[in-house]
Image (tube, rainbow, N blue to C red):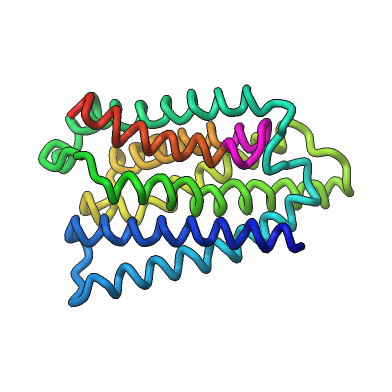
Amino acid sequence: MKKALLLSALFALLGAIGGYFVAQGLALSGSIDLPDESVLSLALTIQAGVLTFLLSLIGLLLQKKTPFQLIDKTKARRGAGLALLFGLITGFTIIASDAALFSKLLPELETNPPTFSLSGLLGGVFYGGIVEEVMMRLLGMTLIIFLISKIRKGKEPANKSYWIAIILTSLLFAVGHLPANALIFGDLSFVVTTRALILNGIGGMFFGYLYWKHGFVFSVLAHMVAHIGMQVIFIPMFY
């Protein structure tokens, strides 16, 4: 329990940093009109920290009752290599798809192309890499496999169970982005919905696989690499 509390506190700290930089990005974009930007920063920082602590603690406690690990040390080198590869593929796919396809179908993307943003980079690395991975992988996938194990009365879940967990959490993550897409594009047209499901779902498939086969550390690393790749490599490359 002590180790779980310490890890949850660490995740909470990193998640709070992510919440702060997400707030900075929102303030700079002007998408939220507040009389005092510090209110937004404080609210998202506290929210991200508290949420990450609670969800990671639950996830870590459930993880002990599943085959999942924080890190599989026997396959650490392969895990790190795949995390780097999958992260770069995810970042490339998102930016390249918008530049080559979706910007032609959605005028909002054409008139407001992405640019490098330090707050976007740090928000993506810490909020995406920590908060979203805690929610989707450490809690989401772990909970699904835990429940399947209970249904199977303690028997080892089959491979298809892990794929169910990966697909479900990826879909949930993608669907969770639909309200933001509706706000940005004005409605949830077929193109807007398809884009959200594909571009937000692809990373979840990679990250979920890494959590299953190599451990949570590598799903976090891949998610962070995806945001670094998008901001540092692929946005300058395509825009």
Which residue appears at 30% of the width and 47% of the height?
120
Question: Left or right: 171 with respect to 233?
Answer: right
Q: Say whether residue 211 is magenta.
A: yes
Question: Left or right: 207 with respect to 232?
Answer: right
Give the x, y percent position of residue 153.
Answer: 89, 49
Looking at the image, residue 121 lies above or below residue 83: below
Quarter of the image where one finds residue 68:
top right
Q: Say whether residue 36 is magenta.
A: no
Question: Left or right: 208 with respect to 89?
Answer: right
Identify the residue at the far left of this view: 111
Give the x, y percent position of residue 224.
Answer: 45, 39
Q: In which quarter of the image is the N terminus?
A: bottom right
Which residue appears at 61% of the width and 27% of the height?
79
Looking at the image, residue 209 lies above or below residue 153: above
The magenta stretch is 208-218
Give the x, y percent position of residue 18.
Answer: 41, 55
Q: In which quarter of the image is the C terminus?
A: top left
The one nearer the camera, 150 or 62, is 62
Q: Main secondary structure of the magenta part?
A: helix
Which residue appears at 21% of the width and 75% of the height?
36
Looking at the image, residue 5 lies above or below residue 212: below
Which residue appears at 62% of the width and 49% of the height?
138
